[in-house]
Image (cartoon, helix red, strand yellow):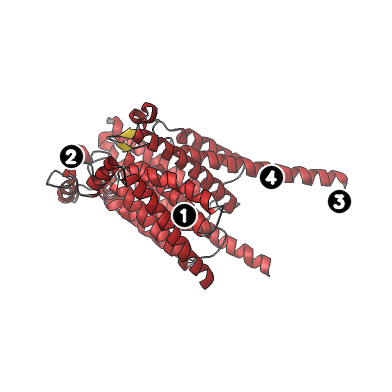
Amino acid sequence: MTAADDTTAAGAAGLRISTRRLQHALLWLLAFSGSLAIIEPSPYEAMFLVALAGFMVTGGIRLPRLVVPLIVLLLVFNLGGVFSLIPYLDHHKSVTFVAISIYLMVTAIFFATILCQDGDERLNAIRGGFVASAWVAAIAGIAGYLNIAGLGAHFSLYGRASGTFKDPNVLGPYLTLAVAFMVQDIMTGRGRLLVSLIKLSVPTLALLLTLSRGAWINAIGSVGLLMLLIYLTSRSSGQRSRLVGQVAMLSAAVVVVVLAALSSGEIGELVAQRAGLQSYDMGPTGRFGGQIRSLPILLDLPNGFGPLRFSSEMYGAAPHNVFLNAFASYGWLGGITYLVLILTTFFVGWRTTLRRGPLQRHFLPIWSVFFITALQGIQIDSDHWRHFYLLLGLIWGIAAATPREEASRRELAS
């Protein structure tokens, strides 16, 4: 090899490193911008376009065969929304609703197609950006709840922490993913324990101060499932024994944070009040009453009520059920397809959970949060949450990348 060849090879290697760093930076910034939802359009939208363009130019996107079913199901789901929109093309809110659905579909496909190369490092970038983002949202939420420097007008809603989101009911589930990442790091011994516990306490406190029953259920279910999966996927009995101790210590730390917050009489009263059923939950015009009344009507409407028209058709009641909303806003085609999408993702996700590899560490918290959030769809509207589509895309992307990782390891071993 000549000196010129050496120079060319070194230049190519340097370019590859620079390209990877650029891609990691784009993913970190994209994940970080996800919490800034108080602004419309959100910086996340602009950052997504930048990241998409950056990955297309640098060749960072690959379409594995396993991701094709996800793309088909998302396309059919949104096609149902387009059909349902036709009678309401002059309704700005309905048109915007469908446009957002299509955009979120593209984000899910993007995340599903960027993990077949450099998957571990790209997931590390997303993970780091998301945790930093959650910290910003959590600090804003706590400051808003306590009305520090008059920030309550900006970062709280109806006396509940909303942070950099418009709705406390969205802030809470958003923080849950960051909490899951941090809990996993503590359980697996990554980083200094005291520092990790302090980092965990901030989003945990903010999550409590959202006073969102759905967020509390989401967090408890997701973290509980994550702990179980970490235990089941441990490689030795010694590791499992150590995990039991870690769980006990972690639980004690969380209890201390919660009890410290509840020691404030005002917070304790609000938490107790929010823990029970509210007046808007009950009665024929309440949340559950509206859901029940809508069922026989939707059975006679193949195209549903039309996008974002459930409340106008059901006397102001919101669906508060993502599956019901799928039929109401996307018609029978969209509703059935959404059910198939979730069930198919469940199959793909559980099949991937026990497959060992460098991506399993990332998959466990992502899957735990997605699975609980999807189940919780019976009482929340999660179809337009940005981080829901982030989770959906990452699950399919990791599932597609895992067999490639296994094949690479077999080649290296042979």
Query: Which residue is tagged 2?
Result: 313
Identify the disc placed on residue 331: none
Q: Which mark is residue 1?
A: 3
Residue 150 image-quadrant placement: top left
Q: Is residue 248 visible?
A: yes
Residue at position x 63%, y 42% in the image: 21
Among numbered discs 4 and 3, the one appearing first in the sequence: 3
Q: Residue 183 has which mark? A: 1
Name the kind of residue labelled 1 in the image.
Val
In front: label 4 or label 1: 1
Closer to the observer: label 4 or label 3? Answer: 4
Label 4–label 1 contact, CB within 8 A? no
- Residue 236 seen in render: no
Q: Residues within 10 Å of mark 4 (few under 14, many from 20)?
A: few
Relative to 241, say whether 151 is above or below: above
- Mark nearer the N terminus (2 vs 4): 4
Taking 216 as reference, is 20 left or right? right
* Residue under label 4: 16
Please name which of the two marks, 1 or 3, marks the residue nearer to the observer. 1
Residue 280 point in image, percent of width and height:
18, 43
How far is the residue under mark 2 from the one under mark 3? 75 Å
Q: In the rendered structure, which disc, 2 or 3, sits on the residue that comes first in sequence?
A: 3
**What amino acid type should be assigned to the residue bearing mark 2?**
Glu
Q: Residue furthest right?
A: 2
Instruction: Give me the C-alpha separation between circle 4 and circle 1.
Output: 34 Å
How far is the residue under mark 2 from the one under mark 4?
A: 55 Å
Residue 376 lies, in percent from the top left, at 31, 53
Q: Secondary structure at mark 2?
A: helix
How far is mark 1 from mark 2, CA to CA? 43 Å
**Looking at the image, which is closer to me, 19 or 306?**
19
Quadrant for residue 86, please give it.
top left
